[in-house]
Image (cartoon, helix red, strand yellow):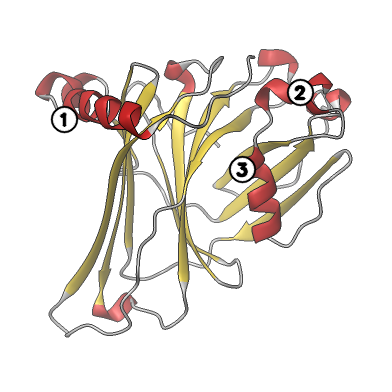
């Protein structure tokens, strides 16, 4: 896999955004190419595996992790001490360092993992949608609906992660993986109070860059909302029409 390209110039983004969004919302694209979290069962846990780019043997480790039923899994490749010479450097992303810092975890020399229970958020509706790949970008939507009964006074964070879903045995991995390819953190200002009849809705629509080497047909989205303690309140993951069930 080639090194991911995570940054585009603003002018490029404007042009590509219009192109990707036009395709995403065309009637033919919606009927044939759109994947969403609609109708998917709620996740019970979020498992995150962090692998140092220096540790090729970690990627090939066949030891399965004990996980709860309906767990959604993410695989982060963390930049290593060997830099671009690291065996897994092509899939490494600095977003992994941001996530480790957010979760107050140390950078692993080999690999580490954490599993967090999804707390559940009665009344909240989180939805993620992906359109087809256009000019190296994936059109994505993340939305959150909150009735007054679901509001919280705790500051919240939204995460949207593009993953490449790799079945067991692919890319020399003995276990199936959701390899993190790109990350978006919407800046949503949560209001503290609402009228009883009012509903608050957050909506993010934009193209996300597809890193070089990632196959568009393998791409999926995983989104979640967490509080300042890092507790996962609710999650959503896309499933495509041809799939029998979402990738975990």
Res 186 label: none
**Secondary-structure class at tag 2:** loop
- What is the quadrant of the N terminus in the image? top right
Write the residue at 30% across / 70% down.
123
Q: Could you say which is closer to the camera, residue 235 or residue 77?
A: 77
Q: In which image quadrant can residue 234 be found?
A: bottom left
Res 88 label: 2
Position above or below: 202 against 99? below
68 horizontally vs 150: left or right: right
The spot of residue 65 in percent (x, y) is: 76, 42
**Residue receiving disc 3:** 95
Q: Give whichever of discs 2 and 1 has the lower sequence position.
A: 1
**Residue receiving disc 1:** 25
Callout 2 touching callout 1 (CB < 8 Å): no
Q: Give whichever of discs 2 and 3 has the lower sequence position.
A: 2
The spot of residue 248 in percent (x, y) is: 55, 37
The spot of residue 73 in percent (x, y) is: 61, 42
């Amino acid at each position: 896999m080639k090194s991911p390209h995570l940054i585009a110039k603003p002018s490029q983004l404007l042009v590509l955004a219009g192109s990707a969004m036009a395709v995403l919302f065309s009637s033919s694209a919606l009927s044939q190419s759109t994947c969403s979290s609609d109708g998917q069962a709620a996740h019970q846990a979020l498992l995150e595996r962090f692998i140092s780019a220096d540790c090729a043997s970690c990627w090939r480790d066949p030891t399965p992790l004990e996980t709860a039923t309906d767990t959604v899994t993410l695989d982060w490749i963390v930049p290593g001490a060997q830099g671009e010479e690291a065996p897994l450097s092509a899939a490494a992303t600095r977003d992994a360092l941001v996530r480790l810092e957010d979760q107050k975890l140390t950078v692993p020399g080999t690999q580490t993992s954490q599993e967090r229970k999804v707390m559940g958020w009665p009344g909240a509706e989180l939805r993620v949608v992906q359109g087809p790949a256009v000019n190296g970008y994936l059109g994505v939507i993340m939305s959150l609906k909150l009735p007054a009964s679901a509001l919280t006074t705790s500051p919240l964070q939204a995460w949207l992660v593009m993953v490449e879903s790799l079945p067991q045995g692919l890319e020399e991995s003995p276990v199936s993986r959701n390899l993190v390819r790109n990350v978006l953190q919407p800046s949503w200002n949560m209001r503290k109070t609402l009228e009883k009849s009012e509903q608050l809705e957050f909506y993010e629509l934009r193209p996300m860059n597809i890193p070089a080497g990632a196959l568009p047909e393998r791409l999926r989205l995983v989104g979640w909302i967490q509080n300042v303690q890092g507790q996962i309140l609710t999650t959503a993951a896309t499933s495509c029409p041809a799939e029998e069930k979402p990738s975990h």
